[in-house]
Image (spheres, helix red, strand yellow):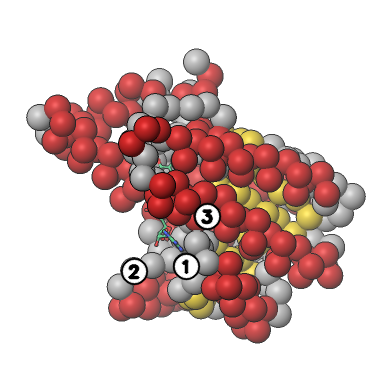
Amino acid sequence: PLHGKTALVTGSTSGIGLGIAQALAQQGADIVLNGFGDANEIKTLQAALMRNYGVKCVHHPADMSKPTEIAAMMAFAAEQFGKVDILVNNAGIQHTETIEDFPVEKWDAIIAINLSSAFHTTRLALPMMQAKNWGRIINIASVHGLVGSVQKSAYVAAKHGIVGLTKVTALEMAHTGITCNAICPGWVLTPLVQKQVDARAAREGLSDEAAKKDLVSEKQPSGEFVTPQQLGALAVFLCSDAAVQVRGAAWNMDGGWTAQ
Ligand code: NAD
């Protein structure tokens, strides 16, 4: 159903972004990957997407903390495919520390990567979407766009901010064929979360397995991680015609975290 569409997914060389890129490619969308990593591994990811799903796939290494690099990435997508139809703002980092000890440069980096980058990609993608009167913008927020947790001031602020940006984008586009929604995942076992598992294991003298179990069950009633594949399926739904009236939503997929 997404044949002929171009999807740009920021931070898609790993974790949730990669799962969403795979799900969109499976539906036939051409893919612009973005994110850091080993050049050969990224080439392998690109080749796998092209081979498995028969789509085109390019990669741009723009650093999402740098507006000029973001603009270069959007121009590259336009040059490669003539347009961006689906924009998934997913790139994100985490740092945990109490507010009084939070490094100022980490605050600035988290706000830039997890929040401001989505403003820049969105402002540059909208004219391309408006030209076709079709578009889907999906912002990967978090349960931390809806509730707080200790030691995550910058992350929670950025994620609440992106939920707000999602609402305004949806409202400004309300009379068009362009929708904007946020997805709010609970715990997903990606490298970003593995770091928090490792810290817990070290702090409490637990095995990797026990630390994972503790981390998930503390907040997530299902006791199970959400998977990048499940989030990919939700993104595919939000891109479908059936989802055209889903606008400005912050859709949690969190094993019950925010139902408590
Ligand atoms: P991850 O560390 O596996 O992947 C992050 C991706 O972003 C990688 O491709 C990385 O190269 C890229 N990236 C990091 N900094 C970048 C920068 N400056 N410029 C460009 N790319 C950059 O993390 P993940 O867990 O897959 O997280 C993806 C998104 O999902 C983030 O926004 C995160 O906040 C959000 N999220 C994650 C979870 C979770 O439990 N893992 C839960 C809720 C929300």
Look at the numbered discs 2 and 3 and tell me whether their residues touch, using CB distance below 8 Å: no
Q: Amino acid at mark 1?
A: Asp
Which residue: 25% across, 28% down?
Answer: 213
Q: Is residue 191 left or right of residue 50?
A: left
Q: Residue at x 50, y 15 (%)?
A: 260
Question: Would the CB of label 1 be found within 8 Å of ligand 1?
Answer: yes
Asked which secondary structure carries label 2, the reply is loop
The yes-or-no answer for disc 2 within 8 Å of ligand 1 is yes
Query: Tag 1, which secondary structure?
Result: loop
Q: Earlier in the sequence, mark 2 or mark 3?
A: 2
Which residue appears at 21% of the width and 38% of the height?
199
The disc placed on residue 37 is: 2
Per the image, the residue denoted by label 3 is: 112
The label shown at residue 46 is none
Q: Amino acid at mark 2?
A: Gly
Foreground label between 2 and 3: 3
Alpha carbon of mark 1 to alpha carbon of mark 2: how far? Answer: 12 Å
Between 144 and 154, the one nearer to me in the picture: 154
Q: Which residue is mark 1?
A: 63
Residue 67 lies in quadrant: bottom right
Residue labelled 3 has its Cβ within 8 Å of some atom of ligand 1: yes
